[in-house]
Structures are given as C-alpha cells and as structure tokens.
Amino acid sequence: MNSTQQTQRPTSAELDAADPLAEQREAFYSPGGGQLTAYLDGNSLGRPLKATSAKLASFVEDAWGSRLIRGWDEQWMDEPITVGDRIGVVTLGAAAGQVTVGDSTSVMLYKLIRAAVDAQPGRDEIVVDRDNFPTDRFIIEGIAAEKGATIKWVASNPASGVRTTDLEGLISERTAVVVLSHVAYRSGFLADAAAITAMVKETGALMLWDLCHSVGSVPLELDAWGVDLAVGCTYKYLNGGPGSPAFAYVNASQQDRLQQPIWGWMGADNPFGMTESYKPAKGIRSFITGTPPVLAMQPLKDMVELIASVGMDAVREKSVKLTEYAVALAEDMLVPLGVEIVSPRNTAERGSHITVDHPLFGEVTQTLWERGVIPDFRPPHGLRIGLSPLSTSYAEVELGVTAIRDALTELL
Ligand SMILES: *Cc1c(COP(=O)(O)O)cnc(C)c1O
C-alpha cells in the first residue's frame, strides 16, 4: 500500500464516529483503571453485558430465592426450549422447536454425531477436517472407536478452510455424517454452508455444522440451507459467560429419526412419572439429558435480545468492516516485520477474527496481556485477533495492532 492510499484510509476515530452500532458498546462492562486497553478475544470469551450483574442478582432473589422449587414448574423446565427458540429465530434462521440449550459443546457434539451414525445403518464413515477444533476431532475419534466406524479426514488449506472441492471423492454412500466448522477457529475461514450442505445431502449423508465461531457474528439460515444438525457455544459471540451451556439444532425432519445416546430423565417422555424404563420425549426435548443449567442460561438471554434489536445483518456489516480494518492495519504495521496474515483476504470468506503468524507470537502474547491488550495465541505461531462486533471499537483494533507491532519490534 502506498502513502496516498494510507492517508485516504479513514482513521479509527472517523470509523468509530460513523459506526451505527457505536452506542451498543456502552452496554458492555469495561473494567476501569486502565486494566484493559484492547479486548481482541471476544471470539473466545465475550465480554459481559452491564445488565448481567442485575440479571443474575434478580434471578437469585426473585426466581430462585422466592419461587424456589416452584420455579421448575413455572418456567425452568421449558427454559432450554424457550431460550433455544430465541437463539434459533434471532441468530440461526431456525423456526421454533428445533433448538435446545444445555450441556457443553463437546457433549452436544457427542450426542448428535452418535445419533447421526446410529441412524444411518450401512454407512460407517464419518467425515471431518484435519484442522477442525480439537474437541470436534477427539469426539469423533471416540465415536469411531465405539462404533467401529472409519474417519475420512478432509485435507484443506489450513490458511483457509474446507470448500466443496475438498469433499469430492471423500463423501459417498458410506458416509454417515459430515462434521465441519462454519467459521474455522484458526484461520477464520467462512465456509459456504449452503453449497456444502446441498452436496452432502445429495449423497444421503447428514450434515452437522459447528457454529461456535459464527453464531452471533455471521447470519445463518439453517432451515433454508436444509442443515440437519448444528451445535454451538454461547460464551463466545453470545456473551453467556465462562462455561455457559451449548445449543443444539436438530432439523424437525430428523427429530423422530434420531435418538441421542445419553438417556436421562429430563429427556424422557414424562420426567416426573418416575417410570420404569426410558421412553424419549417428543421432538427436540428428547435431546436433553439431565437437569438444565438454568442459572448459566440467564446472561446470554440479554445478548440474544441485544442482537435482535439491531439485527444480524447490521452485526455482520460491522464485523466485516472491523476485520477489513484489522487486515489493512496488519498489512501496514505487521507484514513489514515478517508477519504473515493467514486468514482469507476475501471478506465473503471470512468470519469475525483474523489470525497472524510469526514465530515470536507466543512471547508477544504474554507481553500484550501484561499491557492490557488481549488477543489469544494458538500454537504453533498464530495470534488471533477476534472482533466482537457489538463490543469492539475501531480505536481498540488500532491500539491492539499497534501494540502487537511494538511488542514484536522489541523482540526482533
Ligand atoms: C470453542 C469451541 C468448542 C468448545 O467446546 P466446549 O465443549 O464448549 O469446550 C468446540 N468447537 C469449536 C469449533 C469451538 O470453537
């Protein structure tokens, strides 16, 4: 980039001033006393909303403290489905009755992948990519061992992600289920979910999308795309807090066909019937196992409503502008120092984070954390800059990339 282009680029102050979502940042808690200069890890743990403290206090006093055990009958038994429906309508493009909230993402992956394999007799292969998040790969290794199934590994370009062409020759009439991340956790590559889903379904396999890095940052159309199954985190872009529960989407057309493998009383037909043996509940409720994590579901509700108030399209527009700005700054300040941008340059193929690589980034990240600049580090050399659209300012991005440059320069 030459100097004329540089001067033409708007400053972070100008970008913040023109940002239609700028005022939403006020909704998030921010520690005082200079503890935080730039938070660039909302893709790993979203910041709390200011409303969350009051929400939890009132839950303790009014719901738990006052209603006590009556709360289960009055509201909490339905909470996994009512909260799931809101996540579905606001962020997933899913009609009601297809989403439930509970467990961790890992456990939800197990339940859905195992159910998918069980429902496809004669199909003994599971397709997953080598660069998928470790838990996704590990869960699949476990299921393959349990079921005597074979894993077909997709080899894709690690600096981007899985494309339809990478799946050619791998999916067949032997494929039970294909498991891919919609936004790759390392590169930020945004897969073409509509095209891949159509291709997978053509072979009679089931398609499961891991939405951990896309829910709340990228608009989703699960129903329209014909997706069978999906799981995702609520502590990343849904700001549910550390360990907040996962969600699972099971397309209505698959709910009677699929039986999840962890049979507990809360997913049974009549939980308080204390019956002799397990009979699954109807519909999405059968994907529940034990007592739902009601307390841990409270914070994310406000974030889902905040997203609803602005709309996912506005969220995505800001996300695209933030990553474009981060890429431009990285090109100016980091690439000259030997840093490589290992995320897609095409915004249509990028989620809400970018990764930059340098052999010294492990050390750099430690220095940055001490300075209140918080990206994260993914071995071997990746520094991830996560840009949570509703809570991140352009000024934060500039401060962050400048701090990365300074910390790296000190070590060179
Ligand atoms: C964050 C993340 C997970 C996390 O799984 P947990 O069970 O919640 O720890 C799983 N898959 C992907 C792709 C992720 O990004």
Image (tube, rainbow, N blue to C red):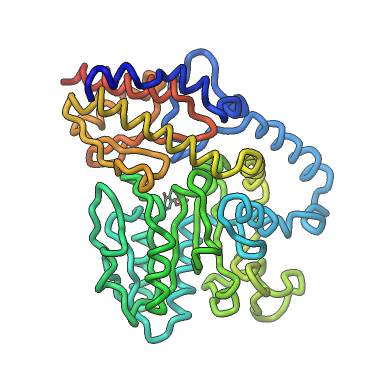
Query: 195 or 66, which lies in front?
Result: 195
- Residue drawn at x 46%, y 37% is 319
Question: Could you tell me which quadrant the N terminus lies in?
Answer: top left
Residue 270 location, x and y as percent? 73, 73
Residue 267 location, x and y as percent? 64, 69
Question: Could you tell me which quadrant the C terminus lies in?
Answer: top left
Query: 254 or 293, which lies in front?
Result: 254
- Residue drawn at x 42%, y 74% is 201
Placement of 349 over or under 122, stated as above or below: above
Residue lying at the far bottom in this picture: please name it: 122
Query: 280 or 157, which lies in front?
Result: 157
Residue 295 location, x and y as percent? 67, 46
58 lies left or right of 125: right
- Residue drawn at x 57%, y 50% is 91
- Residue drawn at x 30%, y 53% is 161
Q: Quadrant of residue 206?
A: bottom left
Residue lying at the far top in this picture: please name it: 33
Placement of 139 over or under 338, stated as above or below: below
Query: 15 or 65, which lies in front?
Result: 15
Residue 148 location, x and y as percent? 33, 79
Q: Quadrant of residue 411?
A: top left
